Amino acid sequence: MRIKTTLAAALMAVGFVCQASAANVVYLTGSTAMRSTVYNQLNTPGAIFDSGATITRATRKFSGSNPNGASYMLFLGTISGTPTYINCVWSGSEAGIASAANVTLDNDGQPLAGSPATWLKADGSVAMTDATSAPAAGELETFSHGADLATADTSQAVSWTPYVANTSTALKDYGSMGIVTFTWVKNVNTAPNAAWTNLKSITTYQMQALFSSPQHAALFTGVSTDTNYVYLVGRNKGSGTRANALADSGFGISTAVNQFSVGGGVSTPATNLLVLASELNNGFESGGSVATALSVDGSCAQVDPFYGYPGWLAVGYLSTGDAQKGGLTVTNNWLSENGVAESNGTVMDGQYSFWGNEHLLGKQNIGGYQDAVGSKLFNAIKNTLNATAPNPANHDGAIGTRWMNASKVSDTAYPTHN
C-alpha cells in the first residue's frame, strides 16, 4: 500500500529532502516475543534502512524504561534511497498471521485485538519521539487493515488462520529466522510460604493438569502439606507463546484452557494490584503483560479468593526476554521443565524443549518494496543471530539456527539431536 500524503515536515526533521512527495509504508506485526530483536534491527542503520541513514522512531505504550517493549513502533528512514516508514503493532504471532491475511480472529466470541490491526498514522502527523502512554486517538489511523509482514513463533501449518490457496490466507513464508525461547515462571513473593519455596519445576503432565484447572502445589512439589492452589496466568489465542506452550505440553494448540489474571484483568493489567480473576480461555495480549502480572508481590499473604486458603500461587509461560523483566529472576522465579533448566546450552543441545522456530510471513502476493523489506528483515535477523555463538550459560531470547545441535521436524514435535 502506497500512502500519498505530504511528509515534508517529518522528512526534513530527519534530514531528508524531497519535493512534497510520498514515503513508502510497510506494515509489520506479530510476535511480542520477537519484537525486541526486530526493534534492534530497525534501529540499526545498514540493517534494514540504508547505511548511514538517519532513523527516527515513535514508540507508544511500553512497560519499563526500554522502548523495545512498545506495543506500537513507527520508524522513518531511507531504504534504497526512498523515504520509508516501517509501521509496527505487536499483538502476538497468531494475531499477526490473521492480520497479514486481513481476517479477524475470533477470541471466544470477541474479535481478537490486532486481527487486523489499527496502526499509527504514517503521514508526518505523529511525533517521532518515545512516549510511555498509549497512542492518542488522533495518532491512529481511522480504520484497521491488514499487515504486509508478520513475525510468528510457529509456522502457518498450526495456525488458527490456515493456508488456503488463492485466498488472502495464502501467505508467503520467508522461512525460519532463528529460534525463539520460552520458560515457565512463578510469581514474585518476597515473603514466601513453604509451597512457593518448594515449587521449583514443572513436568509435561503437570502442565496438562494446570491448563485444565488450578492445582494444589503438592502436585508440583511432592510435599503433601503444600495445599495452596496454583493458578495459570497466560496469553490469549493471538499468541505464539501460547501455541508453543500448548504444543510443548502435548495439551493441544486448539484445546481450550483455564487461565487467570493478576492485576485487574487481561484488558487493563495494573502493576501492584493483587487481584486474582478468572479469564477462562482468554489471556493477556502480550508477554510483557504476563510478566507484569507475575511481578505483583504478595499472593502468599493473601486469602485465596476462590478456595479460601491462606495464600495462593501463580505460574505463567512467557518468552525468556519477557521473563527477565519486572523482577522475575532466573534464580528465584524460573521453573525447570522436566528436570532441565532453561539456558542457551540446553536449548541448543535439545535437552530443553520449550522453544519454537521464528517465521516471517508476507501477505498474499506480496511484491515490490514490501517484499524487498521482508527479505531485508529476514536476512538481517537471520544473519545477526548466526553471526556470534551464544554463551551456553545465558538465556537469550533468540538463537541462530547455525548454533543449534537439535531441531524439530514440526511445530508440535519434540527436539531431536542433529
Image: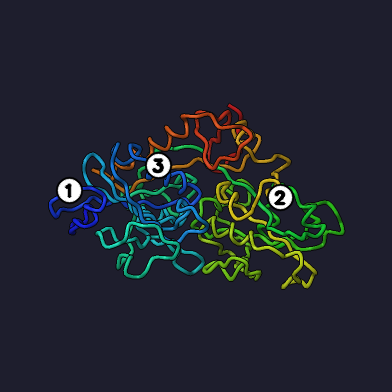
Q: Is 192 on the left-hand or right-hand side of 16? A: right
Q: In this figure, which residue is indicated by the disc labeled 2?
A: 332
Compare marks 2 and 3 and give the one earlier in the sequence.
Answer: 3
Identify the image quadrant of residue 393: top right
Q: Is the Cβ of the residue at disc 1 closer than 8 Å to that at disc 2?
A: no
Can the viewer see residue 1 in this picture?
no
Distance between mark 1 and mark 3 Cα atoms? 24 Å
Amino acid under label 2? Asn
Residue 321 on image: x %, y %: 55, 47
Quarter assignment of residue 132: bottom left
* Rendered position, 353 above or below 270: above
Which residue extends farthest top? 418
Query: Which secondary structure lies at badge 1?
Result: loop
Residue 41: give its label: 3
Left or right of 286 in this view: 164: left
Q: Residues within 10 Å of mark 1 (few under 14, many from 20)?
A: few
**The C terminus appears in which quarter of the rendering?**
top right
Q: Are marks 1 and 3 in contact (CB under 8 Å)?
A: no
Label 2: few (<14), some (14–19) or many (≥20) C-alpha neighbours in 10 Å:
some
Marks 2/3: CA distance?
A: 31 Å
Hey, what amino acid is under mark 1? Val
Q: How many numbered discs? A: 3
Q: Which residue is mark 1?
A: 17
Regarding mark 3 in the picture, which secondary structure is present there? Answer: helix
Give the colour scheme shown. Answer: rainbow
